[in-house]
Amino acid sequence: MLMKLHLADTAELLERARNVREQVFTIEKKIPRSVEVDELDCLNDSCDHFVVEMVELEESSMNETVLDETEPRATGNGLIENKQIENADICALRCKRIDDKCIQLQRFCVMKEYRGVGVGRFALEQIENYYWAKGIEVITLDAKFHVSEFYEKCGYVVVSEPFMEADLLHVVMEKRRGTK
C-alpha cells in the first residue's frame, strides 16, 4: 500500500477531500451536512485542505527486481505506473490558519475500512512536517474525547477542560514543533 498526502490546491482535489468527509461525517456518523460543511470549505487563504490517497499494488510488483521497460516506476505525482490496480481516497482534513505561528487541524477523518492501520498517524506526520517546514510552531485541534488517546500517542497534549461541541465531548489538544 502506497499512501500520498495531497494539498487540495485545485477544485478537483478539494472535491475529493469533501467526498471523504461526506462519507465519514454525514453518511457514517450522521452529522448533519449543515454542521459539517461551512464557509471555510473552499479554496481560499484561511484554510488548507488535504486528502490522502491510497494506491494498492499487485504483490508481484512489490517484489520485482528486473530492470526493464515493464518495471513499475514512480511517476511525477508519486504513484506507480503499470501495476496500479486500485486508487482510493481514504482520509481528509483541513487546517485553519490561526496566525503565522499556529494552525488548527479540523475535519480530520479516515474512511472506516482504513482505520487502525496507520493512515491517521501517516496523515498527522505529513501535516506536521509540512507545517513545521513553513515555520509553524503550534498545531492545535479540538479532539473528540473518545479519540484523544490517539492524538496523545502522536505527541499531542490536552490543554483544556472537556467541553461539548456538536453534542459530543471534546478537548483542545496541541503539539509544539520539536516535540515527539
Image (cartoon, rainbow, N blue to C red):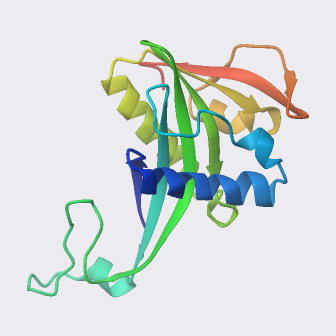
The residue sitting at the left extreme is: 68
Q: Quadrant of residue 165?
A: top right
The one nearer the camera, 90 or 121, is: 90
Above-or-below relation of 66 to 98: below
Question: Is residue 99 visible in this depiction of the protein?
Answer: yes
Whole-percent x, y for residue 107 in the image: 64, 40
Whole-percent x, y for residue 9 in the image: 38, 44
The residue sitting at the right extreme is: 167
Image quarter of the N terminus: bottom left
Q: Quadrant of residue 130?
A: top left
Question: Is residue 118 visible in this depiction of the protein?
Answer: no
Above-or-below relation of 152 to 62: above
Residue for point 49% across, 41% down: 49
Whole-percent x, y for residue 168 in the image: 88, 35
Specify whether 89 is left or right of 164: left
Specify whether 36 is left or right of 5: right
Whole-percent x, y for residue 93 in the image: 56, 42
Above-or-below relation of 92 to 45: below
Residue for point 86% across, 21% down: 163
Residue for point 27% across, 60% down: 78
Q: How many marks?
A: 0
The one nearer the camera, 143 or 22, is: 22
Specify whether 163 is left or right of 101: right
The one nearer the camera, 44 or 134, is: 44
